[in-house]
Amino acid sequence: MGSSQLFSSKAALPLLPPGLARGQRGLSRVVVGTDFSLRSEFALARALRLPLGHGSVFCVLHVAPDLDGQAGPGGSLGGERCLRKAVASVCRRLRNRVDVDVQEALQHGDPVEAASTLSLALGAELVVLGRPHVTYPVRELAEDSMARRMVRRLGASVLVVVPHPVRAYGRPLVAVDFSRESRRALELTLRLCPAPAPVDVLHVADTGEEEAALRRAQAPAEQWLRLRQEREYQARVALGRFLAPYRETGRELEVRVRCGEPAEGILAEASERGSDLLALAMSAMEARTPLTEQVLARAGCDVLVSRHLSPAS
C-alpha cells in the first residue's frame, strides 16, 4: 500500500446505524478524492454542497508519489502542500460548521486500493470523485478508468461528478428494480437531496425477451401495444407499493415507468427529464455490472452508485 498520513482535528465518531430514519439526516462521513485537477475541483465543490450532519467527518484524500505538481523555477511542489491548500480552502468554506471534522489523508500507492482502505477505516458513507465530460461518440469505459475501478472496488457508495455548475440538486432521478439495494439507493438520494426537492423514481420493465418472441412470430402491432400496456400497469402498481413508506414522510416522489432495455431506458429518462443526478444501486456481491458501467460511460449528469456491504463483508 505504501506510507500514509492522516491528520484530524477531532476523535473518530461512532457510526450511525442504517435505516429509513437516516433519510432525514445529513451524511456523517464523506471522502473526496483529489488529484488537484479541474475535475477534482468540481468534485470537491459538489461535496461541499452536500448536506452534512452534526458531528460529520469530511476527509480529503490524495494519493500520489512523493513529489507531484509541476516543475518550475521554484522547483517541484509537494503533494502534501497541495493537499493542505485544498483542505484550508475546505475549512474556509465550512467555517460556520464548527461541528464538522475536516480531515486530510495523504497516501502513496494505488489510488483505488488507498481509497478502499481509507473508506473502510472511516466507515465512509460516500466517496466523491470527478470525471471528464462525456464525449461523443460515446465509448465504453476503459478497463483502467478510475471511475470504473472505484465503483468496482469500493464497498462504499460512490458519487461520480461531471464538470458543470455546482448548485443544489434540483431534479434527481433514481432507477429502482424493487430490490433491497435499490431501496437503499433511494434512501441515500433522499438524504443527498433534502425536501422540498422533488425526486423522480424510475422503473424500466425489461421487455426484451418478450418483444424478441413477438418479432420472431411476426405478431401484429396490437400485441406489441398490449404487452407494453400490461407491463407498464404492473410496474406502476409495484412502484406505488415500493414508494408507500416514503410518501408518508411527505416527500414529493414522481413515478416514472418505461419499457425496454434498462440502461437505454434509464439514460433516455434522465436526458428527457433534465436530471442533474442519476442514482442506481449495485449489489454488495457484484464486482461489476454492465448496466452500471453503461450508465457511468454515457450519463451527462452526476451518477450516484449506491453500494452497501454487509457487516460480514
Image (tube, helix red, strand yellow):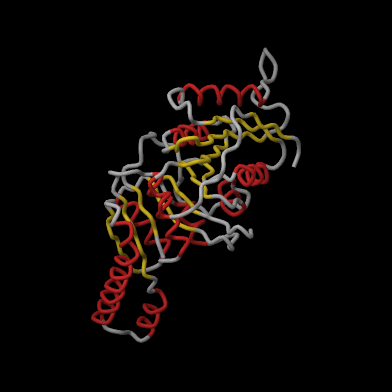
Q: Residue furthest right?
A: 2
Picture layout, residue 303 above or below residue 243: above
Give the quadrant of the C terminus.
bottom right
In the foreground, 180 or 291: 180
In the foreground, 272 or 179: 179
In the foreground, 133 or 313: 313
Residue at x-position 54% and y-position 37%: 32
Q: Is residue 229 left or right of residue 210?
A: left
Picture layout, residue 248 above or below residue 219: above
Picture layout, residue 195 above or below residue 255: above
Residue at x-position 39% and y-position 84%: 216
Q: How many marks?
A: 0
Q: Is residue 77 left or right of residue 128?
A: right
Q: Residue furthest bottom?
A: 217
* x and y percentages locating residue 154 in the rendered image: 60, 50
Residue at x-position 39% and y-position 71%: 206
* x and y percentages locating residue 120 in the rendered image: 63, 47
Picture layout, residue 86 above or below residue 278: above
Give the quadrant of the N terminus.
top right
* x and y percentages locating residue 146 in the rendered image: 59, 45
Q: Residue furthest top?
A: 73
* x and y percentages locating residue 288 in the rendered image: 57, 60
